[in-house]
Amino acid sequence: MMGRRAFLAVAGALLLGGCSAGEKDAVPAARGRAVASADAPADVTDESDEEVGTVGELLMTVACGDAVVTYELNDSPAASALLAQLPLTLEVDDFSDNEKVFYPPARLDVAGAPLAESGEAGTLAYYEPWGDVVMFYGPFSPNGALYELGQAVAGEDGIAGLSGTIELALVE
């Protein structure tokens, strides 16, 4: 039987282990859990408290607890289709050892979107066959069904720690 001290240690670790108590293997269920949210941060800064972005850039934040990752999106129809769905509250899941994924409520149109060929950490991409958006926190191998949506411009180190519920918002 587990002692009180061991129980409290395990409970504390579970509560502090992620942004929410989301299940790790809930990828299929994540598709049905999209909920609009107006609470996502609108003001984005990097660690030096300098404002990120300039007029004309398409910026999106992904927030989870204290972690905020800011992406500069390209001008592809796929990136525009993602922005049109914001704000969103979704579940994020681990996939492989270099990426986090989430499922937007509607699929993205990849016509005219560039392939994600850089292989660089910080890339935001869309995997068309599965309909998931991929946030890479490590190097990756390009493939013909992975379309680039943008690049992290602030908070890239926080991608690997995202878990549970995330909030996506347009930076205005």
Image (cartoon, rainbow, N blue to C red):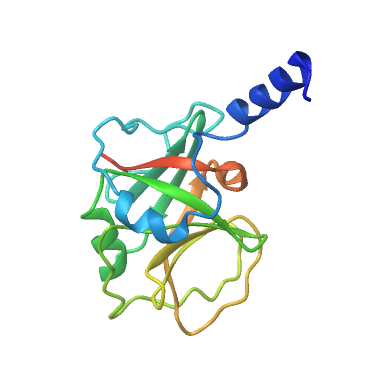
Which quadrant of the view contains residue 136? bottom right
- 65 w.r.t. 127: above or below: above
Image quarter hosting the C terminus: top left
Q: Residue furthest front?
A: 1
Is any part of residue 76 visible from this angle?
no
Residue depicted at x 40% and y 33% = 44
Which residue is nearer to you in this view: 171 or 52?
Answer: 171
Q: Answer with left or right where residue 128 lies relative to residue 77.
A: right
Q: Residue furthest top?
A: 4
Q: Position of residue 112 (x, y in %)?
A: 30, 80
Residue depicted at x 61% and y 64% = 120
Residue depicted at x 30% and y 65% = 75
Q: Position of residue 170 (x, y in %)?
A: 29, 44
Which quadrant of the view contains residue 42? top left
Q: Position of residue 123 (x, y in %)?
A: 52, 61
**Figure disc tally:** 0
Q: Answer with left or right where residue 171 lies relative to residue 91.
A: left
Q: Answer with left or right where residue 22 lies relative to residue 72.
A: right
- 10 w.r.t. 74: above or below: above
Image quarter hosting the N terminus: top right
Q: Residue furthest left?
A: 84
- 114 w.r.t. 6: above or below: below
Q: Position of residue 56 (x, y in %)?
A: 27, 50
Which residue is nearer to you in this view: 142 or 91?
Answer: 91
Which residue is nearer to you in this view: 87 or 61?
Answer: 87
Is any part of residue 79 visible from this angle?
yes
Residue depicted at x 64% and y 60% = 98
